[in-house]
Each structure stands twice: as C-alpha cells, then as structure tokens.
Image (tube, rainbow, N blue to C red):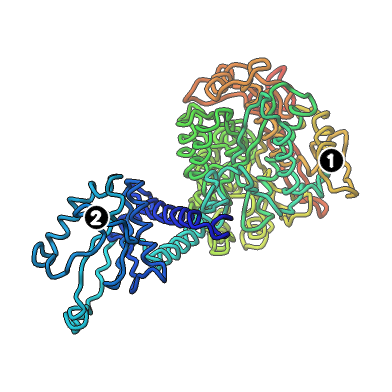
Amino acid sequence: MVAAQAGDATARQFHLELRVLALLEDLRENFRPRALDLRRRKRTVPPVVYLPRATEEDGGLLLLRTLSDVRSRRSEVDPLLVLAAVPAAERLRPQVPADPEPGTAPHRPDADDEEGAYGADARYQRWVTNLNAGQSPGRAATLPWILYIPMPADELRHRHSAQHSTDRIRRTPAWVLWSRPCLAVVLALGLAAGFLGNRYLAGRYCEGRLLGSNTDSGLYDGECVGVATGNVRLAQGNTLSLSGAGKGVTFDAVERAIRAENAAIGPREAHVTIVYAGPVTAARQADTRKGLEEITGVYLYQHYANVSTDQPTKIKVLLANAGENMLHVLPMARHIADLARRDRSVVGVVGMGRDTTETEQAARILKGAGLPVVSTTNSGSHLARRLSNWFGLAATDEEEANALKVVARQLAAREKGAQGVVLSRSVGSEKDFYTTEQARVGKRMLAEAGFAPAPSRTYRLSGEGEPELTTPIGYICGSRPVPKALYFAGRVEDVPNLMSQLGSTPGCSGRGITVFTGDDLTKSNYEEGEALRIPDEVTLYHFALAPMDLAATTGFYIDAHRVLMDLLPAGARRTALTDPARPWTDGLFSSGQTVLSYSATAVLYRAARNGDVPQTAAETWADLRWHPNPNLPVGTVGFAGSRPYADQRGHGYEIVRVSYDGGEVRSVNVCGRPAGSDAPLTAPPGPAGADPHTICRLR
C-alpha cells in the first residue's frame, strides 16, 4: 500500500489486482448456489458494469486488462459482466515487439471482415472455444476474457435508434420474496402475530407470554385455576386474615410462608411434593376463608416437618385452585395430573373439601395420574365406594344422618305424630352435590327417627347469590300441623336468612322448631360477630367433622399459634388465645378446617416416606391403607383394614347444639367420638361401660 502511494508502477499494478481480486471474490461469495438466504435464486442474472468510454486516460482499459489477467491466473469464474465502449483507436494491450505470431496480435480485426466471416454467434462460439487456450502462459499477450464486438460508427448512430424497451422486467417469485417491501411486510406481520399471540397466551394462562408460558395454571372465568408454580401466586394481595387469635395473619402471608419453605429445600435434598387442592380465589376475599384455613393447616404441618422436627425428607407444598366454590375442579385436576407426570416427587393431593357434581370425575383424573387423594371436609358418601384413590377424613353424609338420628329420635318420642320436613337448595350453576346428598339422607333420617313425612321443599339462589326462602318457608309454616323438625340441606351462608324467615313467618314464629343440618355450618364464625339471630324457640343441631375437644391435643394449638404469630408484620399486635386451657375453642381453630387439613397432610406425608427415604405416589397410595396415624388433633386417623370401593370407618365427629341465649349465640357439644373410634352414638342412659361422650343428651 505504501509503495503504491509512493508511485511504484509495479506496486500500483499489484494493488489494483488485489482490489479486483477482492471484488471478484466478494461477488462469488454472494452468489453461492446453496446459500441459505436464497440470494442466487433471487438474482437470476449476473451484475453488469457499463463503461460508456474506456480509455487509457480514464483507467478503463487498465481495469479491463486487470480483470482478464486476474481471471486467467485464478482460473475461477465469477458472475461479473463488464460492458465497455472502447474507441477504435485505443488498444487494450500496449504495443508489443514486431512480428507477433499470427492470431496473437492484440489488434482488433476489421469489423466487416469479422462479421462477414463469422457472424455474431460464430464470433461468440469461437471466443468460447479459444477461452481455455487463451489463458495459457504462452498466450500471455492476449486478453482471453474479453470478447471483441466491432461496431461501425454508422451502426451506432442509426441502427435501432428508435427501438426502446418499455416492458417492465418480470419479477420472479423469488425476487418478490426477498425484496425489501416484502421483508418489511413479513416483519410487520410477524410483529403483529407475536403481539396477538402474546395477548392470546396472556389471556389463557395465569403466566402467559409468547416465549416461556407457564401452562400449569390457566384463566377460567377470570380466575387463575390450576397449580401455582413459577411466579404464579393465587393469594397475592389477599388481606383476609385468620379469625380469633390469628387476626393479622393474612392469606397473602400464609402463601408467602409456604413459598419460603419450598425455597429453603435444597436441590439435592430428599423431599416429597404435596398438592393442596381447594377454593383459593373468589369474587370477594371474604369467600376465600375455607381455602385460607385449610392452607394454614397444610403450612403448619409443613413447618412442623421441615423446621420444628427437621425431618430428613422435606415437604414441598404446591397450591392448586379450583376457583370459587370449586366450580372449576376438572381443569384443576387436569393441571395437577399433567404436573405429576412431569414431576415424580408429587405423591398425592390434600383437600378436595367440597362435594360438587364434578368431584368424582376430577378424582378419576387424579387416579389416572397415579395420585391418591386425602380429603379434608368432603362428606360425599359415594366417593369412597366408587374411587380406590379416595381417602376421606370427614364422616360421610350417611354417617352424619345416622348420628343426628339419635337426637331426632328422642325429639320425635316427645310428641307422637309430629311432622318432619326437608328443605334443600336446588342444584344450579353452582354444581353443588352436597345439598342433593343432604336432602336424600335427611329425608330418610327423619322418617327412621319417627317423624311423619311432610312434602319436601326446595329453594334456589337469586342472580345475586342470595337464597330465595320466602316461598318455601311460607308453604312449610302454612301447613297444618306445622312441622316440629326441619332438616336443612343447604349451605352455611343461607342459615341467617333461614332463621330470619322462621322467626318472622306466621305459623313458625313463636313455635318450637328443631332444625337439623349437616357439617357445613362448622365453617361459620358466628361467635366472632357474624350475623346470626336464632329465634328463641328454635334449636339448631349441626354436625362437626373435627372432634377437637375429644382428642384434646393442647400442645398442637399452642405451637400452631406461636408459628402463625411469626407471620405477622414486624411490630404488629399479637392476639392471645381466648382460653389457653381449651385453645380449640378459639376462633382460630373452631371451624375445624385447619386441624383437618393439618391431619390430612400428616397422613399423606407419613405414607410418602419409608424411614428417611421418600416414596413414589404409587407406594404412598399403598401405604395409606397400612399404618394408623395417632396423636393428631382429631384423634387417630388411619385407613388400615379399609377395602377399596367400600365405606371407610373410624371417622371422628360431634353433634353441636346452637341456640340463642341472653342475646348471644351459644354452641354446646352434645356428643361425639374422636377419630379412630367405631363406638356408635346412643341415647341416654347408654350401654354399660359406654364412653360418656357417645351418649347424646337433650336439654
């Protein structure tokens, strides 16, 4: 480069040849036939360079000579075509010594002689034929890559002067495909498709995006349904707090505590994964209390195993949401099953505490994935009979009715011929199978207790979700005689309206009526200030699934309260237990849902490990029928000896009497038995040696 700039002719020539070589190599590189960008298919003709006048002075002849020399030396073909107009007086090669061999002189033959002798096509064919020979070292004076086409001046001036091409060049599909406008359109369409795809995925999954969507949970009717994995949180921002001594501990705090426990498990630490399945979200935060209390119980046992006792096999807890009232239990079950097939540490499901028309089908989906279900509060009588993977801690609807029959029979004996009526909620969009079962067993219970059957009545919910009880209560209270017993096959949220109607409807107002109902009333917190006004003459008997006072494991409640207080924000006021001697009576535990989910998690976890070694879901399923689990807050829970597709025994329960006394709601445990006991409830005086708690005494 320096020598060329200094005026060295040889260096300048070399520099020119180097640049020409680089140009030709670039052209060859850009016209590779097998290039991925299809450039060869787009450009079907070689690039053309037109030199309108090539002389020695402007360097045109030097460029032509250099192109020919470089091609001859490289013996490689490149796609460049140069069209140059060279004046007749110019010579492409400088004059060489005299007497060159015939055919080697670089002068141009006379145009007319050449045209006449060969013609244009013949001249081209002769040039092609001599091309290889012209590149030999002995023909160095020739320029083999240059085809001479003599054009007389007269022809250049007049021939075809009026002929101009006005046709547009036909663009091939390949050219159109790789044109800039097409690429711009494709890019715009790609961006639009990406935006719409991202928007679609964001509306389908709780954590949906174009790349890396989390498919473990999806959006159904605006609710995030499925398993909360990754960054998905179901209770984020939910400020609903626990009742009683748990005030201030929010749903959001409990979920964050579970995630912290999960994060503390090392990647190589032995662990099992337990999925809680239940209603975690709702339109109103107040309607998520069941999910909050059950998840609190799951967290308490996770903390007990991972931290308090530092078990070698840790518990990882995942939350699965079935939506408000578990209306989306089927898609939730599918998400759990898909996750279990990918994650072999998943050993089973805890929860499924609401009996809907789709619960059985959902449990079958989980069964297909090899997962056992340890249910908390689901009292469906048919589930254990039809599903081998169903393990229920709750007494069934039939067990509830048989237990309540002990009390109902004593009432029927006091007034011969008294009538009994069933009032049930009709099944609509809420898919509630619990009320259907309660109506069936309640009708049979009243008849077997000795009440004369009155026509059953049903009620439905309004568009706002309120019970429409005016008409059915009017029929009941207007009948003669007015029934003395009413079996209410409804939900806890409908009880205040029922009591209001019984206290204000003529025929029932001021008359002594006994109302029986199932276990759903235990979810209430009327002693915490919820609105309930029971008429003075009305007595309410309901069923409780968690006989906490009969097991009397005081230490559990004290430890649980201490652990939950650690979830309060720094500086928050701590609420003490109402009665430390009877801590289960505190609003924090009184519903029984926390202790049932705690016990269910304990049962599943103990079956999921063999000593210090975690087991698979199949091994866990088998071991659930093997060992009893003593010292739980509800008693001894176990399924040892229970056969698949048959009723399960040993459920604990209590009968609770609720009345309005002195301006306050009073609850009294009438009778019951702890979990693990098969002792039947009896009327007084009871058989000799019977447990006093199993003798049901009226006031």
Q: In the rendered image of this protein, does residue 536 appear above or below residue 403? A: below
- Decide if residue 77 is in sight here: yes
What distance separates the C-alpha of mark 2 from that of mark 1? Answer: 111 Å
Residue at coordinates 62% horizontally, 51% vertically from top-left?
Answer: 281
Q: In which quarter of the image is the N terminus?
A: bottom right
Crowdedness of circle 1 by 10 Å Cα count: few (<14), some, many (20+)? few
In the rendered image, the vertical position of residue 396 relative to residue 631, given as above or below: below
Which residue is nearer to you in this view: 294 or 2?
2
Between residue 272 and residue 125, name the one nearer to us. Answer: 125
620 or 203, nearer to the observer: 203
Element type where label 2 sits in the image = loop
Question: For the residue marked with disc 1, what is the amino acid?
Answer: Asp
Give me the disc on residue 99: 2
For the residue pair 590 and 38, the one nearer the viewer reads as 38
- Label drawn at residue 566: 1
Write the residue at 28% across / 48% down: 135
For marks 2 and 1, the one nearer the N-term is 2
Q: Quadrant of residue 309?
A: top right
Report whether 225 appears left or right of 654.
left
428 sits left or right of 263 in the view: left
Crowding around mark 2 (Cα neighbors within 10 Å: few <14, some 14 to 19, many 20+) is: few
Residue 606 coordinates in the image, percent (x, y): 66, 22
**Above or below — where is 615 with respect to 357?**
above
The C terminus: image quadrant: top right
Q: Position of residue 412 (x, y in %)?
A: 61, 40
At label 2, which amino acid type do we have?
Asp
Q: In this orientation, does residue 413 appear?
A: no
